[in-house]
Amino acid sequence: GLLSLPVELIHHLSSFLAVEDVLSCSMTCHFLRAALNYNTVWKRYLPEPDLTRLESLEQHVQPAFHPEQTFTPLCEYWTHFMRKTRLLKNWRQGNVVDYGVKPSYNYADGRHNALKGRGQVIYQDRYLFLGRFINDYESDAIEVWDIDKVPVLDSTLEIKDINYDSFFIVGTSLVVVACSIVNVHKITIPDKKYPLWFSFSITEDDVTFHQQHQHTGRHNERCIGWSHWTVDQYLVSNKCGENVFHIWDMLKACKVGSFFSPFDGFSISVHSYIKNQWILSQNMHFANGYYLLKFNFENKSFSDSVFKFDSYSQHIIVYNSHVIVFKNADKSNSEGWYDTVCTVHDFDTSVELRKRRFNNANKNYLLQSTAVVNGKFVILCFDCFQIIDALSLETVDHFQCDLNIKFIVHHFNLYGSVFVVTSNDKYILDMWDVTKKRKVPIKLRAVYTNPLCYDGTFTKLIFMMYSKIHVYRFW
């Protein structure tokens, strides 16, 4: 019978079971519990993010998870799976502890409520880096906040005479972009020091160590119009109107190179990436259309495959070998609203494969947050959420929502389970568990325009209001 099989064969058989069935088997007898208590069994049920960080984080939500509460010691990956399950349960049940503080400075634009600079959580998901502005235009520092409990100002990096455009966290370095000059600082928490490591000009090849690279000549049009992205350890930069992008290695302190697009266009940006395969977006000249290009970082070359779209779009998703495009319908309805038209294309040929029109487009105002998870995406239609197959565009499931919901603000892929945050006609935010098809019992004290940051393990959501930092802890 089953109990006479070798442990290795039981491990193989368990690979055909859902995790719920593996858990059921482990509770039938001591033999199967011991046979399934191996990392090889539980590794397949863990997400890619490293959940070992949860072990070192203090638990604020009660009751806390303790591995020693189980009958017998669990293997490492089974324990990580149990932690993931507890975190997911806290999201679904709205088990949260929230902290708020009113700082002395502003970190978001008072008119548009857009985040100034870029906030990121680093170092055991504990420290939040924020650009400090003394008015709507002038900045004088980057502040580091400890958000383990009630947010507390931990340290400050003063920036003299610079209104920086953006900053990024790469490994243990803080990358500050000002004009066309990039300054890379080492982060030494808890020493609260940020010494300058190296500095460079984006368009040049030279690197200056331990002192700021000197800006040559006057500040003019060459200093404006820059956009920047990070891909793993690399900083990617492009100047609006130019057909070239520059790549710098932030860990090796050197320039990788400058690369020209094979197509006639301008304003190249990083759309997405998977390992060495980068997807770049490039605007066409004198048109609303764009190209999507495949750039192989390992070979430093462009693929012959290119996707071309000759119209304006609200949102695009690259999914495997397909491109999903969302755009407004050509004509509005009787109330002046434009429906949303979704099309699926082959990436290599740009041929349209599927097309569907979704009614009530005012509920899909913020489509930029839409994402494909497990081959499906979520969209609002009238009084319900529709769960759509990403390739066939057919509705595979749906469930009712509140009638006064205006649009989806945020999508979260929490280890394969989908959550969305919606805004109603009074700008009140609600959270919905799409996988379980119900509203999460949690009150979010924010509005849809408030910038949102979150850590890599989804233990915290941080809303940046004009004069307040609000942290929601799910762990």
Image (cartoon, rainbow, N blue to C red):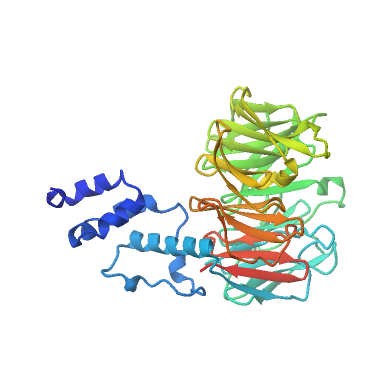
The image quarter in which residue 291 lies = top right
Closer to us: 232 or 205: 232
Residue 32: x and y in percent read: 21, 57
Residue 447: x and y in percent read: 73, 61
Q: Residue at x 78, y 72 (%)?
A: 105
The image quarter in which residue 388 lies = top right
- 91 vs 177, left or right, is left
Closer to us: 360 or 283: 360
Can residue 87 be spotted in the picture? Answer: yes
Residue 454 higher or lower than 254, as above or below: below
Q: Residue at x 44, y 74 (%)?
A: 64
Residue 72: x and y in percent read: 26, 69
Residue 328 higher or lower than 400, as above or below: above
Q: Residue at x 74, y 26 (%)?
A: 310
- 74 vs 288, left or right, is left
Residue 2: x and y in percent read: 16, 49
| Number of on-image labels | 0
- 96 vs 142, left or right, is left
Closer to us: 434 or 128: 434
Closer to us: 315 or 336: 336
Q: Residue at x 71, y 44 (%)?
A: 364
Can residue 52 be spotted in the picture? Answer: no
Residue 176 higher or lower than 304, as above or below: below
